[in-house]
Amino acid sequence: MINIKRLAKSFKYAFQGLVKTFKEEQNLKLQTGIAILAVILAVFFRISRLEWCFLVFTIGLVILMEIANSAVERITDVLKPRINSYVKEIKDIMAAAVMLSSMVAIIIGLIIFFPYIRPFFI
């Protein structure tokens, strides 16, 4: 049986984590701004349902990777005194994951929006 109080607490804590990450992570703010711009363009150009699926998935992927990166950074900061030599590598690897997800998002964004934007430049 689902305990509604525990479920509500879980959502409350998750929302608090999202707000904290958004307040503290500059990249998440930038990525959120770009996501909002992409959604505005998608509404303006009336993209297809399939394009919406790719857009929402891609936005979610980038945001999730940034949040995961923030969590891993905090964990490594706690471990730093004990496992000093790996901390930089761990942070670099997570930053690479965020960067790659962002690059994929840019490519998907170009694939989706280029056909709609091209007539403005021809």
Image: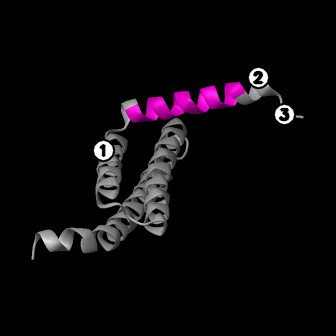
Q: Residues within 10 Å of mark 2 (few under 14, many from 20)?
A: few
Question: Residue tagged by mark 1?
Answer: 33
Residue 65 drawn at (x, y percent): 48, 53
At a point 40% along the width and 55% down the height, the residue shown is 95
Q: Residues within 10 Å of mark 3 (few under 14, many from 20)?
A: few
Q: Mark 2 near mark 1, Cβ–Cβ under 8 Å? A: no
Q: Would residue 10 be counted in the magenta stretch?
A: yes
Q: Nearer the viewer, residue 11 or 74?
A: 11
Question: Residue tagged by mark 2?
Answer: 5
Query: Image quadrant of residue 6?
Result: top right
Question: Residue tagged by mark 3?
Answer: 2
Q: Mark 2 near mark 3, Cβ–Cβ under 8 Å? A: no
SS type, badge 1: helix
Q: Nearer the viewer, residue 73 or 117?
A: 117
SS type, badge 3: loop
Looking at the picture, which amino acid does disc 3 mark? Ile
Residue 110 drawn at (x, y percent): 29, 70
State which quarter of the image contains the C terminus: bottom left
At a point 61% along the width and 28% down the height, the residue shown is 13
Residue range in magenta is: 8-22
Residue 14 drawn at (x, y percent): 59, 33
At a point 53% along the width and 36% down the height, the residue shown is 78
Q: How many marks?
A: 3
Q: Is residue 85 left or right of residue 107?
A: right
State which quarter of the image contains the N terminus: top right
Residue 16 drawn at (x, y percent): 53, 27
Please name the predominant secondary structure of the magenta segment in the image. Answer: helix
Q: Mark 3 near mark 1, Cβ–Cβ under 8 Å? A: no
